Amino acid sequence: MVKVIGILDYDLIKTFFSNLDALDVKLSTLQRTRVYEQSFEDGTSDLTVYNCTQEVQTSEVFAGQYALKVTVSSGQSGYVETPRISISPYQMINFSLVHKENEYVQSVKLVVIWRRSAGGEIERYETTLTPSSEWKPEDVTLMSPKNAATMTIRFEITAKSGGNAVVYLDDIFMDRIGILMRQDSEGNVLVKDEGVLSRLDVELSTRASESTLSAIRAQTDKLVFDVNNRLAIQNPPNLDVLLSTRASESTLSSIYNRFDVALSTRASESTLSELLNSIRPSLKGSLFNQPVAANTNFFTSYLTPTSPPCTFRIFACFNVSGVLSVVKRVGETEVVMQLNGGNTLSANCLYAFDIAVAEGEEINFRYSVYATALDVKIYEVGASIS
């Protein structure tokens, strides 16, 4: 069976591809659309807090009558975070804010988190800011990654041991730059030239000469023409044992689990390397001979799985006995679950635990007493080897 899909004009195709570079547009000429604004001028805040407090106040302001005061206790770390803002993949986003700090701020960090529509984290951007006793503006422009559906801005603060850290925030703005990008079924950006597309009408066959069609035929052995010089697609020949010499890497990857013989006899080195990387455990977090406070998260940022569903395997050893707990967070909801049946871990003994982690879940750990973590390692283990 032969299926005809249309007629190609060789000169038209050559003109189209030779002008692809001209499809670029300067970002400065694109329209900006405000998608988030928080100046606290209504006396309220929509930011969420973790291990800190927030207060809309009037004593320290950048503009208007109100600004946000964030306080982190001495020697602790915490953060405030904006609501999740809907965006599209490959979308340019500009966000800005102003801040000032007191003398007990050890460090401040600006973190942008991209998430899928299901809530799982895709990627994050982090930059360390310089604490300032005067109002200081920050301005960042980023492009959202493939498959991104939402983004949040997080302001992480660490306090010195001598006193409570105070950070003031004001005028948090987020602008979308340009138009939304359309994607194909795999999340890749679709690009088209309307000037070229308008010429691809049903009467194109009246424009191509016999010499043009012959030139196309001579340039590639992959094009097949019928008796009327129309480009056609033929059904592929029967799939025999030489499939590996014809199928692409993506095809082999999609059907590898259906082979009844060793895949290594057919797949290329690159395919085998990708399969090996997918099952190799990856280190998500670690502590070595470091103090941990009682009932306090080990890690400032929660651990997120790279390829959920998967297993987090933790190896832990402390210098004093205590109860080890896992903290699981989904969205804004946290649950704390004790490991080892709630029984204390013996001092200076190494333990191992497995924790199932699904998409959208974030993980942290706590110890019931002040102790030194002699060795704590958390690995992400793929479902195929867990």
Image (tube, rainbow, N blue to C red):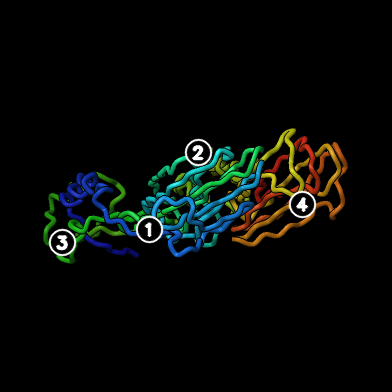
Amino acid residing under circle 2: Pro
Q: Secondary structure at mark 4?
A: strand
Q: Which residue is mark 4?
A: 325
Please give the name of the residue rendered at 72% of the width and 34% of the height, measured from the top-left corner.
Answer: 288
Checking the image for residue 264, the label placed there is none
Amino acid residing under circle 1: Gln
Please give the name of the residue rendered at 38% of the width and 58% of the height, measured from the top-left corner.
Answer: 183
Amino acid residing under circle 3: Ser
Few, some or many residues within 10 Å of mark 2 (<14, 14–19, 20+): many
Lower sequence index among marks 4 and 3 = 3
| Residue 258 appears left or right of 30 | right
Task: Give the CA distance from mark 3 to mark 1.
Answer: 30 Å
Lower sequence index among marks 4 and 1 = 1
Residue 269 at what x, y percent from top left? 53, 38
Q: Which residue is mark 1?
A: 183
Front-lying residue, 154 or 343 = 154
Foreground: disc 4 or disc 3: 4
Residue 310 at what x, y percent from top left? 65, 52
Residue 140 at what x, y percent from top left? 40, 45
Task: Give the CA distance from mark 1 to mark 2.
Answer: 40 Å
Query: In the rendered structure, are the residues bearing label 4 and label 3 in contact, judged by CB atoms less than 8 Å apart?
Result: no
Q: Is residue 126 visible?
A: yes
| Residue 148 appears left or right of 196 | right
Q: Which residue is mark 3?
A: 205
Residue 276 at what x, y percent from top left? 60, 41
Task: Give the CA distance from mark 4 to mark 2.
Answer: 34 Å
